[in-house]
Image: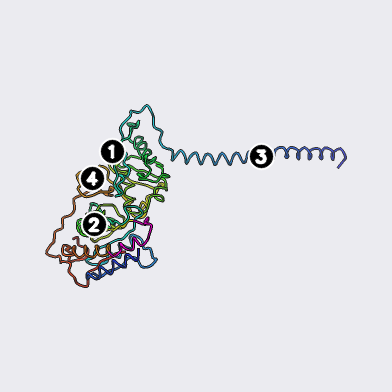
Amino acid sequence: MLEFAAQVRTALEAQGFQVVQTRQGNANPSFDDRSAMANAQRAAIFVTLHIASTGVPGTARVYVMNDIAPGTDATGLIPWDRAQAPFVSLSRKLGDQVSALLAQRFKGSPAVAQTASVRQLRTTAAPAIAVEISSVTVDDRAQLDHMAPGVADAIARGAAAFRPTYVVPANPGERP
Amino acid sequence: MTPRWRFWFLGALSLAVVVAAIYLPILRRNIRQAAKLQQRSEEQARRELTQPTVINPSDPKVKAKLFWASGADDGTVSPVTVELPLSNEPVLRAKQVLNTLLAGPVDTELRTVPSDAALLAFYLLPDGTAIADFSEALGTSTPSGIQSEQMAVDSIARTLEANVPKVQRLKILIHGQEMETLAGHLDLSQAFPVNANAGSSRPRAAATPGPAVANPALTPAATTVKLTQSPDKSATKP
């Protein structure tokens, strides 16, 4: 997974993005730790990578959170457990951009982002997507390795295409 | 001690030895039996907890829709109509359909939940929130991954949706505990809406926690700036 992440990092940097990895080496930060790292960034997008145990080998899917009720807080702060709520539509735009590129490259992959209640995405206050690659059941690990450059390129190009539509609030903590 | 008392003492001692020799094996056997009984009652309790709800043949036969994998290997589920005698009582009915779902389809390849998972308890609150408590196997034996985890939840939620109209939301517990995720990805901390996705055109592979609401519109205000290719923007990833 870290090798995949390294390739995604390189591709994003080639598109001019600054990349912060929430996991380094064998460390296994909690969901909240990762969200805290992401939420501390300004004008960020969040991409979480997974290799699935199921699915058609050689395909990749993008997931975004479904609609979640934004919290009503008198202070105007976004409740932690609903941090993704104001970003759902932006996440979909980003997810659809990346999905379309993945579908072009990996036959059988969905052309639009799918919705799922991914725990990691819920507490992330940024446009956020989960990219899942199928699968660990491939006979030869090289099959997965061959997918890495294509997945990295699709994420980076999708993020670059999404960039002009991402309107970032001027003040930290403001909703998009 | 006089010879007479010595005689009685030795006699009593010999009798005690004989009685002990007879009683000890009986005592040992009783202890073994008691241990076995205790073990059996624990097993019995566990089996009673996990035993599928008995289907009462006198209940009216209904065409129940059970959602198993569609077979397309894309994480979707599809309904299979099964004729079952189902109770009209919602909790019992929910237990009956979920236990049938857990028993699995004829084609085991289409199974959505692990074969060793069991429904431990099912409650229905007055507001329509269903609480389904599954054994640990649901979490430990479901293949890890967003697609497989959401397929498991989707098959449960949609089976309830199709057969128990009173269920509005579904909260999943594992062995009586609230879990953060099912098998590492799918969020179990909130209730899944049931009957809440009609009309949605976006692909849905699983019900998503929380009430469905309209998206807040993306309204660029005067105080916003556009993300540009400057060094201070960040992309984060694991």
User: From which residue to which does the magenta span run?
Assistant: A135-149
Residue underneath mark 2 = A103
Majority secondary structure of the magenta segment?
A: helix
Q: CA distance from mark 1 to mark 2?
A: 32 Å
Residue underneath mark 4 = B197
Query: Do tag 2 and tag 4 residues touch (Cβ < 8 Å)?
Result: no
Measuring from the top left, give residue A154's x and y in whole percent. Answer: 24, 62
Residues indicated by labels 4 and 1 sit on the same polypeptide chain: yes
Q: Residue at x 19, y 60 (%)?
A: A175
Q: Nearer the viewer, mark 1 or mark 3?
A: 1
Residue underneath mark 3 = B27
**What element does badge 2 sit on?**
helix
| Sequence-wise first label, 4 or 1 | 1
Q: CA distance from mark 3 to mark 4?
A: 65 Å
Residue underneath mark 1 = B162
Q: Nearer the viewer, mark 3 or mark 4?
A: 4
Measuring from the top left, give residue B175's x and y in whole percent. Answer: 41, 47
**What element does badge 3 sit on?**
helix
| Sequence-wise first label, 3 or 4 | 3
Q: Nearer the viewer, mark 2 or mark 4?
A: 2
- Amino acid of disc 2: Ala
